[in-house]
Amino acid sequence: MAVARRFCLPLLAVGVGAVASAIAGASQSSARSVGAGSLAFVANDPLGIAYGIARIGRDGSGQRLISSRPSGATGVWQAADAAWSPDGRWLAFDAENDIWIMKRDGSASRRITSGAETDDSEPAWSPNGRQIAFTRYHVRSDRSTIAVVDVTGGNADEITAGASPSWAPDGSRLVFVRGDFQDSEIFVADADGSNVRRLTSAGAGSSDPAWSPSGREIAFAGNGDMTPSTRRPRSRTRLGPRSGSRLR
């Protein structure tokens, strides 16, 4: 069963409207990550053809496009899915179907994954900053896996089926999505892909999971009451990562 590679859902974003209006000649698309006093997000050009990573201060100052075409890039340069490293010094992102990293000022861009007929996206730094989990979409077989790669590059380990990974604060587990679009569910697994457990079972289009800083809760987007027979407009729900029980 294929996993939807990207979700466009109304998740919480801090100051997104202000950021959008502050970037001259660009439209905001998908705020991703806050770190070291700055917000990193994807900015489209006016035609929506090319896009890159932009950075802006939390107070709306200092906005600028920081991703630029590196020497190793080919084709049309489009960068997306910005994610800060835990120390705030680096950003991971996807471009040209691979995962890249660059310094917070946009310099020293380098590709850390590569693969034939695969599309790598949605990078997530491990809490210790040594690894990046990401979604790897296999074009021919129309399936997605969670993969993990060292920030220095090298071969990525595909640890389990799924998409949209997020690390537990202690780095011991990952939460992610499995399923097709409106039937996707939230799962957790150990960091090596073992002990996979499903947390939701509503067939309600669950997506975009994120751990709380305490590691006691997981927030995600879903359809209202999270039961198939009583679907409501999309809401945000929190679950306990061990039992999958709803938290108030």
Image (tube, rainbow, N blue to C red):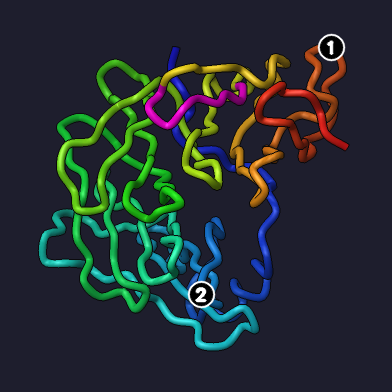
Specify the label residue 36 is tagged with. 2
Q: Amino acid at mark 2?
A: Ala
* Horizontal and vertical percent position of residue 101: 29, 60
* Horizontal and vertical percent position of residue 237: 77, 36
Side (left or right) of 223 relative to 94: right
What residue is shown at x 85% (from left), y 25% (from top)? Answer: 225
What residue is shown at x 84% (from left), y 12% (from top)? Answer: 229
Span shown in magenta: 185-193
Q: Amino acid at mark 1?
A: Ser
Do the CB atoms of the residues marked 2 and 1 lie less than 8 Å apart?
no
Side (left or right) of 164 relative to 200: left
Residue 236 forms part of the magenta stretch? no
Q: Is residue 38 above or below residue 247?
A: below
Q: Is residue 169 above or below residue 189?
A: below
Q: Quadrant of residue 156?
A: top left
Q: Which residue is mark 1?
A: 229
